[in-house]
């Protein structure tokens, strides 16, 4: 009986680890990027960040993994993962917009 409980507990821990979604993170804007990026590259990178945020929001919608996550940690892990992913993209977008201002890039998309 004790072995069955141990096996079930270990199984739940493994399922919980598999249930937490993982979106990845967006890196900080490096000094090399700040020096070398053109206005067009900044705009492209901003578009990538918007796409990443859309992806995270879409993937974070309720699914079967959420049921397992709720059983394991009440869904807190998925919430924290989403928030960290969005925060990393937001921080990069702020840095890119700041760089865009410092490089005096126009807001005109034809550049």
Image (cartoon, rainbow, N blue to C red):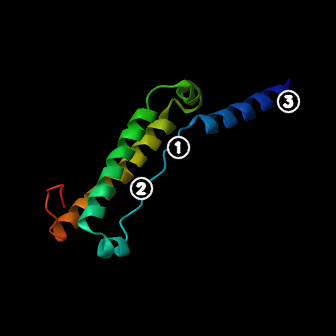
Question: Would you say residue 4 is visible in this rendering?
Answer: yes
Dot 2 falls on a residue whose secondary structure is: loop
Residue at 14% in and 56% down:
108
Say whether residue 107 is left or right of residue 14: left
Q: Which residue is mark 1?
A: 22
Q: CA distance from mark 3 to mark 1?
A: 32 Å
Residue at 49% in and 37% down:
78
- Which one is in front in this view, the residue at disc 2 or the one at disc 3? 2
Q: Residue 8 falls in which quadrant of the image?
A: top right
Disc 3 and disc 1 in contact, CB within 8 angstroms: no
Q: How many marks?
A: 3
Q: Residue 73 falls in which quadrant of the image?
A: top right
Question: Residue 100 versus residue 57: which sits nearer the camera?
Answer: 100
Q: CA distance from mark 2 to mark 3?
A: 43 Å
Q: Which residue is mark 2?
A: 26
Q: Which residue is mark 3?
A: 3
Dot 1 falls on a residue whose secondary structure is: loop
Q: CA distance from mark 1 to mark 2?
A: 13 Å
Question: Residue 31 versus residue 9: which sits nearer the camera?
Answer: 31
Q: Quadrant of the C terminus?
A: bottom left
Residue at 26% in and 62% down:
40
Instruction: Say which label, 3 or 1, has the lower sequence index.
Output: 3
- Mark 3, Cα crowd under 10 Å, few <14 / some 14-19 / many 20+, is few
Query: Residue 32, position in %: x, y?
Result: 37, 75
Say whether residue 83 is left or right of residue 18: left
Instruction: Say which label, 2 or 3, has the lower sequence index.
Output: 3
Say whether residue 2 is left or right of residue 12: right
């Amino acid at each position: 009986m004790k072995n069955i409980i141990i096996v079930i507990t270990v199984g739940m821990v493994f399922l919980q680890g598999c249930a937490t979604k993982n979106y990845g993170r967006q890196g900080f804007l490096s000094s090399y990027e700040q020096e070398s990026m053109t206005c067009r590259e900044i705009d492209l990178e901003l578009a990538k960040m918007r796409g990443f945020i859309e992806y995270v929001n879409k993937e974070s919608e309720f699914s079967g993994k959420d049921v397992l996550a709720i059983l394991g940690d009440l869904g807190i892990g998925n919430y924290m993962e989403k928030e960290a992913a969005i925060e990393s993209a937001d921080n990069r977008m702020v840095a890119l917009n700041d760089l865009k201002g410092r490089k005096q890039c126009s807001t005109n998309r034809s550049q």
